Amino acid sequence: MSISINSLATHLCCRNWTRAIVVAFVTGLLCCEVAVTSPVLADDSAAIEHFEKRVRPVLIAHCVKCHGAEKAESGLRLDQEAGIARGGDSGEVIRAGKPDESPLIQAVRQTGEFKMPPGKKLSDEEIRGLETWVRNGATWPDDAVAKERDSRSLIELAKATLGEENRDSKVRADVAGTGDTLKAETKSTRFPASTQDIVELWLSANTLKLADHESVMLWPDTSGHERHATPTLGHSGGTGTAPLFVARSDVDGRPAVRFQRDNGLATPGDKPLPIAGDASYTMLVVATLRQRFEGYPYDGLLGFGEPASPSNPGRPRSGLLQVDRTGGGWRLSHAGGWNHDALSPTQSPLAWHDRPFALVVVKTPGPMRTSTRFFLNGQLVELPATGSDAISDIAPRAGMAAFIGHVMPWWNGIVGDVAEVAIFSRALSDAEVAAVCESSRSHSRQSEGEQQDVAAPRPAHVLANVATRSESDDTLWAFRPVRVLEPPDVTHGDWPKTGVDQFVLSKLEERELTPAPPADRRTLIRRAYFDLLGLPPTPEQVEAFAHDPGNDREVFARLVEQLLASPQYGERWGRHWLDVARYADSGGYETDIYFKNAWRYRDYVIKSLNDDKPYDVFVQEQLAGDELWPGNLNLEGKQLMPESQRRKLEARIGTGLFTLGPQIHESNMDAGLVAYERLTDWVDTAGAAFLGLTVGCARCHDHKFDPISQRDYFALQATFAPSGEFDEPIMTPMEQTDFKQHYPRIIAVDEARRAIRLFEQTLSGRAATSDEQTKLSTLRNALAQTVLDMPGGATSAPGTPWDGIMEVPTATTLARLRPGLIPTVRLLNRGELSRPREEVSAAIPELLAFVTKTEPPLPSPDGSRAALARWLTQPGHPLTARVMVNRIWQGHFGEGLVRTPNDFGKMGAPPTHPELLDWLAGQFVRRGWSIKDMHRLILNSATWQMSSLATDARVLEADPDNRLITRMNRRRLESEALWDAVHSASGTLNLKAGGRPVMPALEPDELATIRDKYHWVVTADPAEHSRRGLYMMSRRNFRMPIFEVFDSPPNAVSTGRRDATTVAPQALWTLNNRRVYRQAELFAARLTREAGEDPAAQVDRAWQIAVGRRPTDDEQAESRVLLDTLALESSRPAALTTFCLAMFNLNEFLYVE
Amino acid sequence: MHDFVNNRFACRQVERAVSRRDWLTRAGGGFGAVALGSLLNREAPAADTDTSRTPHFEPRAKAVISLFMQGGPSQVDTFDPKPELERLRGQPVPASFAAEGLQLQFMSATGAALMPSPFKFEKYGESGLPISEIFARTAQHADRLAVIRSCHHESFIHGPALSLMHTGSLLLGHPSVGAWVVYGLGCESDNLPAYVVMSDNDVVRNGVVSYGAGFLPAVHQGTILRTEGTPIQNLTPPSQLSTAHQRTVLNQLASWNQRHAAARPDDSRLEARIANYELAFRMQSAAPELVDLAGETATTRGLYGLDTPPTERFGRMCLLARRMVERGVRYVQLFCSDWDGHGDCAGGHRNVAAAIDQPIAGLLTDLAQRGLLDSTLVTWAGEFGRTPVMQGNHGRDHNPYGYSTWLAGGGIRGGQAIGATDELGFRAVEDKIHVHDLHATMLTLLGIDHEKLTYLFEGRNRRLTDVGGYNHIAARLTRS
């Protein structure tokens, strides 16, 4: 019996049980001769199930908001049985057994006096569910109510810990404050007097009284019309998030508002601009835009009116300025109406981006071609001959009047800094345009003057400090600004395909070396598949690619696009980032506790890469997703999570980076020490991952090699100190309901289980008397019944008996600690906790602040990480882009341009191609931090497409380590890629994406070292066992042997680059491992299936699958001899299996050219 | 990519790739590395690497057998007699002792009752070294043991304490002592791993951290050897594959892989991998031969207590350790469980000691008989000691503030005790030896300067002893 009880204990620790498991458990009880006397499903159970599935969710979704604990309108509560029994102010609501006579049913049918819920009728199915419930007696499961409180209190606790209310009220206060100060600054005196009455909107960043990089929650209108712009979330139809204020922007260093593609501002709809029909108007924009190359080809800049009608989204009735990227160009267009565009006069991709401009667009009635005039920096420019229609029907838009950036789901926002916009309600004369431009320019000069004043009062000691350090650190290339470079000229101009090649070739030509010849198509496709997907191509894919009649360049570019669009791309490149993130599923040390939701971070990384999330956003989310995208998930009463909340959740899960580090879990640990070690892990990880610096050295003393002082180090700790780990519940209301109904029964089962164990202990080994037998069996029956009463788990997929059943699904994220819990950070002598010195507050390392022209202090405790993240992702940051493009380069070549990707400091390797690195970093930022764009740039280069065969002895002599990139590096498959390749060959690879980590069955000798056997509970569904390597459970104390011997990184600290050792246990794994042998059997079966019984065809197919090419004649013959030899003493199928095993052991299988 | 491969060319390559600051070449150590390197070119001149492999000090030992007592044995019940406890039995820790500074896991030292050892200590050997009766057989070697009674460190929790003892760091991700040693000294066996780990209950507390390579190349990680069943992971071919067939396949593979490598002559990894298959093949017979004890005499078996239940398992481990040292294995780590005496400390200790006393005594005798003791350093240690005060009902809590270890063999001058704890046996007070000092001392005995055995990681030349470590007791420990 003890076996069953143990298995129940196991099941109790599992959320993922299903009815099947429960039944299996009860079957187990039956096998142990325990009679289950009650019927399997009592009537009560059916009624309860009906209530929980068909009634409670409806009540929660539609009724409880008004008739619940918070409001109880009309004295009625529909969230508890007592409420229903008591009824409302007007009497009973339910007559049990009689739906037709029950007011509640009448109300939802909307046939009687009350029509509920207001504004919307329930679906027929929902109504039928309620009717059935009432007809069957309106049973209300009595235990559910009391237990509801438990989970609710959890969520309340969650909110309290997040400080949600505080944050919201702070934002409100900020907005209100800004508004008040601006009331004083009334009408502009800047624009010409003749325009005073027609300035309908004027937003100037000079009026913003915000700290650098603070969110713009309100951009005041200084036209006098109070059309203040706010983030579009608050407006009907809006989808944007707040842009940031930048004190010294790319617009001549003026203050500006910095937009990313999803930032949008809008003015309120109840203050429409008086511009309608085929009207006259003028728009002014002073901005610097940044080039982007992906997605929907229009980026919204400024507009007003109805951008599209819901029924006809292509029919704007508005004045719009947008960046038009159709046809590969990059131009500004003025749009509205059908066939409407008036385009800016240039199509040069370089004309608009990265340089400040003042654009005035003047519109008079009539066709766009003749009615629009563009003035660039005060000069009239020629109008191209497009846009034959007039915008005859400009109309106000409900919810918002004017808008900037991203405001409609189908309309991207711009990326860039906007210093000023204005809209006038008539066409300005040329003289007025000139005056407006002049005033904008003089304003710009004025703010430049102010800016110098701001920069001047830098504390003397800081400057002195920086000056001395700068002198001694004159070689720190990584801290210098990224240079703006053009690819150099080369002699052999026909070789380069992208700018990358010019940099590489120019270096080779300096040394009179020639690059290796291009790799052939079969080599290229195998290389590209492993590079981008971590998987081999199928023989069919190889053949199709090899024989594609198109020209090499286009055919390959198409392949790259196809691979970048594959969901397996994110898994491959996500795994690279997980190395950097020191990802693991458990905490390490003795207890090695399981992180039940670390996989959500893993899936977040994969999704971010697949979505081509801009890297700056990726960094911001991981460092400060909670601060930058605040707002808990308010799931109350909502069946579906709106997109904006999914966005917040996703941003938050990014902070999981910090929650999955090594953790000690033992009783009575010194809390101070634990907090300190955690901060150490956080700061070291952030430093290595984002800055590419080994800041950890400065924990004990000023960094010996890099200009990071001990004070800088603890200032970084102070930046993270206000943060804590927090389990954020992420259930939908449906799931919460399910959870609530499970919970009380789980408690009951647990109690019963303990009672049985106690009972058995009291027997202490002797046989039970018949009386005792009866007692025990009664208990067991009750237990079995309770288990049976639990409906199937709706919250999760079947299969993995892992997460605790009593746990709410959560994501572990960072959030702000309550003020009282925030530890004071002090500089510690030698890094020892027992030797504290002065208190240190949050700040950017001094020298880095200096080189980025930023003041070191960071706001704290609110928003310290957000400010750090914004500082890191400002376009001019010397490290952020360099560090990341180097990681990308390393992912493609096996070696970075800087060969120490986590150490850009003095002890790190200097870049082999510093100019190329800077050029790539510049491109990266300019292309909106798009990682996929960098893949395109690199893969389509002649450099990446070189052969890896070093045939030229002179090249080998001059460049043995391939630092000059004279050829492609030959690369050994990483452990995950090897795992995937073996399962791909056998045809068993399961490409299911995401979810809990998988624990495949292992041999006893492989499991020998695991301390607690429950640390490796084999995943129930065998189909899971052949999923991709990155989904396998990665414990800090135990990794699967393949990952161990093939150099998966030790996941205690950030790993920038993996080793690739060559050791004998690797040979033992591929030769003897039972799983590998099993895959060889399946490989053999596949060969028979696909190539029939003919040995020659089998051999041919085997080589194609394993190494992507046909065998040579010799190899074919040798393979046949091998097969014949092996078959002499065994069966033909066994011989084929052994031959397949040999394929797995080919060096050509393990290495990619 | 770091590529650690095993021939002369590789050494040059690695030298270039890394930094000459590393005293020892990265390709220079470990299973598959030197083992294979020596196989390919056993007499490869050290000058080829342009770095001296001459030891820093005169090496006293060339192999290590580490007997690790998981859970933390009580010093006052084993090697650090405290008669004062008898006098103060049942009394609280005197106020003058300032016990509040001692943080313990489950209890407070202030107010707790002092508990003397129930075990008798006797003086053994010519030196008269006092040792507890539970180690009466080991005590026959008293003149070979140097007891350090003043060990200490800063963690009273198993996980971090184990991490400190095995890697010198509280944080994860650092290489274990064994990994450092094989990184420094390489392997002398052609067909066995350089660093082997065994555990008496198949469990290693803290998992791979206790024997891992941390940031050193994976090649330096300890290989788990099971004392029963298949000794090494993936060692035996699948049952469907006969040795003859495997040989046939390996021959064909070698031919294919050599053809592949011949077309890529600049890539030494490919050759190294071909050779690894041969090494793997040899290990398939060498490892079973190692664990096959049929050839050992009845006398030897008796020496290790191999045929009596309590000592059988650890005896087997000790005998295997001797066989490994004979075969050129550099570092053998034996884990013994469980010394975590929170409940009936004396009872638990008596049982565990009964299982290992004879085997350890046998090991020392056997090593000495075979002339291996002089070149083999034997160490005995736990992750910390235990309190002289009683926890609960005759238990003792963790105590990292003062505890005992001992060393033998490898030139150690036995029959002496170094350092001392206070009169209660709570804190180390005389000649305090921190974990780093212990590690520095061990490396010194192996001929390595702990400050020069470094590896560049995260921008810093890392060492086993971090920024600490003194080897000042090394001279006192050894025979001149």
Image (spheres, coloured by chain):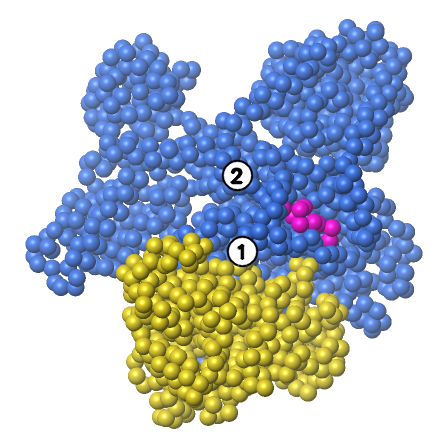
**Three-letter amino acid code at the position of disc 2:** Ile
Query: Element at badge 1?
Result: helix
In the rendered view, does A165 fall on the left or right side of A261?
A: left
**Three-letter amino acid code at the position of disc 1:** Leu
* Residue in view at x 75 percent, y 80 percent: B48
At which x and y percent is residue A889? 72, 54
Query: Neighbour class for label 2 at 10 Å: few (<14), some, many (≥20)?
Result: some
* Residue in view at x 86 percent, y 24 percent: A445
Any magenta on residue A707? yes
**Depth check: B138 or B240 in front?**
B138
* Residue in view at x 70 percent, y 66 percent: A970
Query: Element at badge 2?
Result: loop
Task: Residue A1089: give its label.
Answer: none
Span colored in magenta: A706-714
* Residue in view at x 37 percent, y 40 percent: A794
Which chain does tag 1 point to?
A: A
Task: Residue A822: give its label.
Answer: 2
Any magenta on residue A1060? no
Q: Colour of chain B?
A: yellow
